[in-house]
């Protein structure tokens, strides 16, 4: 009985061991547990809020690795602060075709020479999580920082949000809003005044575009006021409305010229008012033209 019991126990133990081994291979066999990964570092000057350990490293949208560490590096000599981000790239994510394998390190080094750069991008708009996206930007010069020399450094370039902040950092948005407030109030007082209401019916009918323009200006003003803080999220929409407002200004000037007589005091008064409106819209025109040239800048980023 003792020998039979021992054989039974040994058999159960062997079966359990085999089951655990097979289960481990199934669960971890395709994961990072059996991957040999090489680590790299890149440095960012701006905010990395939303970048977490374990976040994705992408190449044109394909996950090829993950973030391992995020540090803070202070250079007392240059009095600068940078954020080194350490990440790894899975070697089985890179396939070489047409030549003998030269090793991951040499492949990445050649890619850097060809313009490979790292950039922070929004991985999920809902969660606000960031990812490091690798792509080729041969028009940029590699800028190496150094400091964590145990890793190969992949140069970084500014994120879309950083570029947007630099482009509009000197635009006095508050003053633009105040200008539009004054413009809207002046137009409202003029249109609702007795002098305007007593104008001949033909002139009032011909200047109906003023009311359309006033509504458009008020709508744009409300949008600018709402988006003053989260400007990066909705600048494209604001720029579109600003452009519509400028079209209304041109339309109003044309109609006023066609209807009012040369020697009419009302014509002089309206033209003076329109000139003030055009001056107030100059700053918004700059914002609208920038968005036309760079429509992709506001779709990511953030």
Image (cartoon, rainbow, N blue to C red):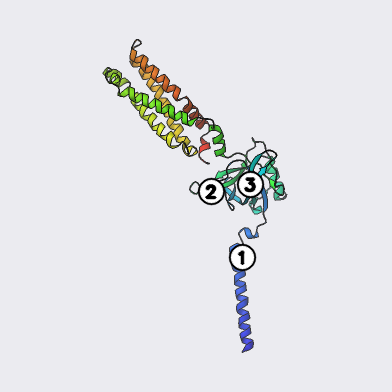
What SS does tag 3 mark? Answer: loop
Mark positioned earlier in the residue sequence (3 or 2): 3
Question: Is residue 247 shown to the viewer in this render?
Answer: yes
Mark positioned earlier in the residue sequence (1 or 3): 1
Q: Quadrant of residue 179?
A: top left
User: Mark 3 = which residue?
Assistant: 72
Q: Give the percent coordinates (x, y) of residue 116.
A: 65, 42
Identify the mark at residue 25; answer none if there is no mark. Answer: 1
User: Mark 2 = which residue?
Assistant: 129
Q: Check the image and name the residue furthest to the bottom.
A: 1
Q: CA distance from mark 1 to mark 3?
A: 38 Å
Front in this rendered view, residue 27 or 221 = 221
Position above or below: 253 against 287: above
Residues at discs 1 and 3 in contact (Cβ within 8 Å): no
Q: Give me the residue at 59% from left, 41% from top.
A: 46
Q: CA distance from mark 1 to mark 2?
A: 31 Å
134 horizontally vs 202: left or right: right
Q: Give the percent coordinates (x, y) of residue 297.
A: 53, 37
Looking at the rendered image, the disc whose residue lies closer to the viewer, 1 or 3, is 3
Q: Badge 2: few (under 14), some or many (20 or more) residues near its Cα, within 10 Å?
A: some
Position above or below: 168 against 125: above
Q: Give me the residue at 66% from left, 47% from top.
A: 41
Q: Give the percent coordinates (x, y) of residue 78.
A: 68, 38
């Amino acid at each position: 009985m003792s020998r039979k019991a021992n054989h039974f126990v040994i058999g159960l133990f062997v079966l359990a061991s085999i089951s655990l081994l097979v289960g481990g291979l199934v669960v971890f066999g395709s994961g990072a547990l059996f991957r040999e990964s090489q680590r790299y570092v890149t440095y960012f000057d701006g905010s990395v809020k939303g970048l977490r350990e374990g976040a994705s490293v992408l190449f044109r949208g394909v996950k090829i690795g993950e973030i391992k560490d995020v540090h803070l590096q202070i250079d007392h000599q240059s009095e600068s602060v940078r954020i080194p981000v350490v990440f790894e790239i899975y070697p089985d994510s890179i396939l070489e075709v047409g030549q003998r394998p030269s090793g991951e390190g040499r492949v990445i080094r050649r890619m850097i020479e060809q313009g490979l750069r790292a950039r922070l991008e929004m991985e999920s708009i809902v969660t606000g999580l960031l990812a490091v996206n690798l792509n080729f930007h041969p028009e940029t010069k590699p800028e190496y920082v150094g400091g964590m020399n145990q890793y190969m450094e992949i140069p970084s370039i500014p994120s879309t949000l950083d570029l947007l902040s630099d482009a509009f950092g000197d635009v006095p948005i508050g003053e633009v809003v105040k200008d539009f407030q004054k413009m809207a109030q002046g137009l409202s007082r003029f249109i609702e005044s007795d002098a305007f209401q007593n104008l001949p019916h033909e002139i009032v009918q011909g200047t109906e575009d003023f009311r359309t323009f006033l509504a458009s200006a008020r709508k744009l003003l409300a949008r600018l006021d709402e988006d003053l803080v989260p400007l990066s999220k909705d600048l494209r929409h604001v720029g579109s409305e600003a452009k519509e407002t400028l079209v209304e200004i041109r339309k109003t000037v044309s109609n006023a010229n066609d209807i009012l007589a040369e020697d009419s005091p009302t014509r002089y008064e309206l033209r003076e008012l329109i000139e003030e409106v055009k001056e107030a819209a100059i700053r918004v025109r700059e914002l609208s033209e920038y968005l036309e040239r760079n429509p992709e800048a506001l779709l990511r980023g953030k």
